[in-house]
Image (cartoon, rainbow, N blue to C red):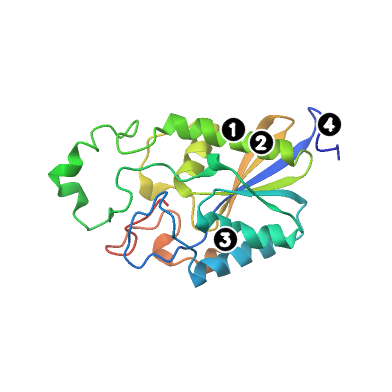
């Protein structure tokens, strides 16, 4: 394959965008960009599982969001390939006005008048970082990862909403959506294949599927009290 710094339009580069593993969050907080939220023991097992899944792949670059859960998810992958782990601020979770609160199925958040002003425009959305802004930063981060791994493979660890939004953009779907229907399970891989600088295909796999609680799998019906912080 071509040298990383001298790619051609025929180079095939694969960028795996991984969602972090399960987080220790006993209070069900929508933690967003808050510091101090680390992987649970199960989350670490998920990270190890994906590292095993990718062990034989031609990975030459591993980069993660600055948040602890993403860094901890990426570490075993970088270690397995003898790579230094890079950090990219553009991969961070989406900003959300409800950060630090419980906000999910059955907690009554939608019935609180104080929250209504933040829910007036789901197309933008009015409660957090605009979808378009997420597309811009995520596409830029993917492009950088592609350039760093030109002709090889990169692993990028981020968060559910930004991953789903950039995938929706690439696949030409509307950006506003039902959060319960995102296909982006914990420790999943959304894989973008580039030919030169153009994305030619998108794939999706769940290497740690058997470790993910049933109610947190992609498309699963929400369970009251069990997924207050879905989407992180």
- What element does badge 2 sit on? helix
Residues 130 and 35: in front is 35
State the residue at coordinates (15%, 48%): 111
Instruction: State whether residue 87 is above or below residue 165.
Output: below
Q: Are marks 4 and 2 in contact (CB under 8 Å)?
A: no
Among the two numbered marks 2 and 3 on one chain, the one whose residue lies closer to the N terminus:
3
Q: Quadrant of residue 48?
A: bottom right
Dot 2 surroundings within 10 Å: few (below 14), some, or many (20 or more)? few
- State the separation of the CA atoms marked 4 and 1: 19 Å
The N terminus lies in which quarter of the figure?
Answer: top right
Q: Which residue is mark 2?
A: 144
Where is residue 173 drawn, in percent x and y?
Answer: 46, 33
- State the separation of the CA atoms marked 1 and 2: 6 Å
- State the separation of the CA atoms marked 4 and 2: 14 Å
Among the two numbered marks 3 and 4 on one chain, the one whose residue lies closer to the N terminus:
4
Viewed as shown, does residue 54 lie left or right of 87? right
- State the separation of the CA atoms marked 3 and 4: 32 Å
Residues 118 and 87: in front is 87
Q: Which residue is mark 4?
A: 6
Q: Residue furthest bottom?
A: 41
State the residue at coordinates (33%, 34%): 125
């Amino acid at each position: 394959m071509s040298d990383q710094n001298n790619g051609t339009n025929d180079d095939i580069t694969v960028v795996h965008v991984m969602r972090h593993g399960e987080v220790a969050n006993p209070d069900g907080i929508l933690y967003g960009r808050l510091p101090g939220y680390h992987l649970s023991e199960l989350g670490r097992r998920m990270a190890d599982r994906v590292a095993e899944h990718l062990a034989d792949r031609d990975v030459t670059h591993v980069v993660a969001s600055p948040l602890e859960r993403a860094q901890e998810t990426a570490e075993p992958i970088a270690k397995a390939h003898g790579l230094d782990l890079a950090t990219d601020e553009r991969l961070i979770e989406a900003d959300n006005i409800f950060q630090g609160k419980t906000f999910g199925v059955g907690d009554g958040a939608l019935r609180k008048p104080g929250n209504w002003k933040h829910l007036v425009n789901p197309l933008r959305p009015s409660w957090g970082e605009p979808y378009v802004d997420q597309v811009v930063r995520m596409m830029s981060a993917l492009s950088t990862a592609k350039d760093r791994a030109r002709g090889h493979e990169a692993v990028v660890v981020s968060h559910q909403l930004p991953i789903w939004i950039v995938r929706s953009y690439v696949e030409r779907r509307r950006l506003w959506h039902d959060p319960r229907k995102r296909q982006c399970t914990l420790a999943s891989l959304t894989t973008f294949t580039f030919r030169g600088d153009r994305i030619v295909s998108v794939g999706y796999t769940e290497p740690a599927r058997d470790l993910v609680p049933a109610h947190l799998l992609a498309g699963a019906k929400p369970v009251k009290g069990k997924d207050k912080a879905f989407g992180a």
